[in-house]
Image: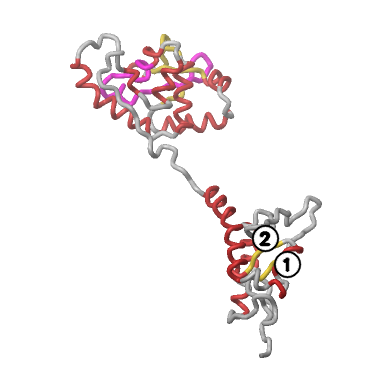
Amino acid sequence: MSDTRNRLTPASTVTRELYLYSGNRCAFQTSDESCSKSLLRDDGTWNCEVAHIQGVKRTAARGDHSLDDEQLRHSQNLLLLCREHHKVIDNKDLEDHYTVTVVKKMKSDHESRYREAMAGLARIVDTTAGLTPRFPVNLRALDGVDDGAFAAASLPDMTAFVSTLAKQPPAIRDLIALILIHGDLERRFGTGLHAGIGASVVHIEGVATTKECEIARRARHLEQVGLLTILEDDDLYYFTLTSPLAKDVGWDIFADLKSIAGDDASIINQAILDLDFTVFDR
């Protein structure tokens, strides 16, 4: 039977796919042996060849098949090997050892590791998903609360407040916690019910490991969701936490949390970062 098959160059998209999922390593691996040679050497030279699982020539290793020219150059029929192991699997005398099934598994096992890694890089994870806030039940850590009347009336508002915080990603709540820890409970910024605990922007930038531009970006987000205002006082700018309940019911939960915590930053972190507001109970 005449050999009428043609060796077509793989499309650029196919070549890109092969290199992307190669991990820059030869794909040769069996139960007894594997190759860890780099396809691109440190000196910039290539030790890499595109190998066919089912051969182009009928007389070649694994050449007894019905694939056409286009199918032969499809990514499913190709893998990247170092020059040494390309010769090994294409040795006609070893065809019974390096069968189509064996070489296909070689490709699949090798590429699957890098496909999984690339899929992981491509994921966008919602960091707020799966959070389970802990809500208070009696609010007795607040000054003057010694019976259940205040708790019964106020717990729905607290639940709404905590639920709003839970929608903010950890990186945003980090800034809230920093402002609370370094803020001033005695000196309030703003006016009337809009006054809140604040910390100078310079101070926050000084204690944070995040770049100033990123702090400003997160602060603008908090402004948009109604949890922060940026004020100027005595030629300094302040981040001022604004409780969403202050305007409606006159309750500044941020101020009460700061009062409960005192100088204990762990209590603030427990509430804001861990979303555990049982710190309001006693």
Disc assigned to residue 278? none
Determine the residue positioned at 53% across, 48% down: 120
Query: Which x, y percent locates residue 31?
Result: 62, 58
Residue 203 drawn above or below residue 274: above
- Looking at marks 2 and 1 on the same chain, the residue that comes earlier in the sequence is marked by 2
- Amino acid of disc 1: Val
Determine the residue positioned at 30% across, 17% down: 281
Query: Which x, y percent locates residue 160?
Result: 29, 29
Q: Along the horizontal axis of the image, is 182 left or right of 25?
A: left
Residue 210 drawn above or below residue 114: above
The residue sitting at the bottom extreme is 1
Query: Which x, y percent locates residue 244?
Result: 33, 26
- Amino acid of disc 2: Phe
In which quadrant of the rendered image does the C terminus lie? top left
Residue 236 within the segment the image draws in magenta: yes
In the picture of the structure, the residue carrying the numbered disc 2 is 28
Query: Which x, y percent locates residue 88?
Result: 73, 67
The answer to whether residue 42 is seen in the rendering is yes
**Res 26 → quadrant:** bottom right
CB of mark 2 within 8 Å of CB of mark 1? yes
**Res 256 → quadrant:** top left
**Residue closer to the observer: 156 or 100:** 100
**Res 156 → quadrant:** top left
Where disc 2 sits, the SS reads loop
In the picture of the structure, the residue carrying the numbered disc 1 is 88
* Separation of marks 2 and 1 at Cα, in angstroms: 10 Å
Residue 151 within the segment the image draws in magenta: no
In which quadrant of the rendered image does the N terminus lie? bottom right
Residue 248 drawn above or below residue 148: below
Where disc 1 sits, the SS reads helix
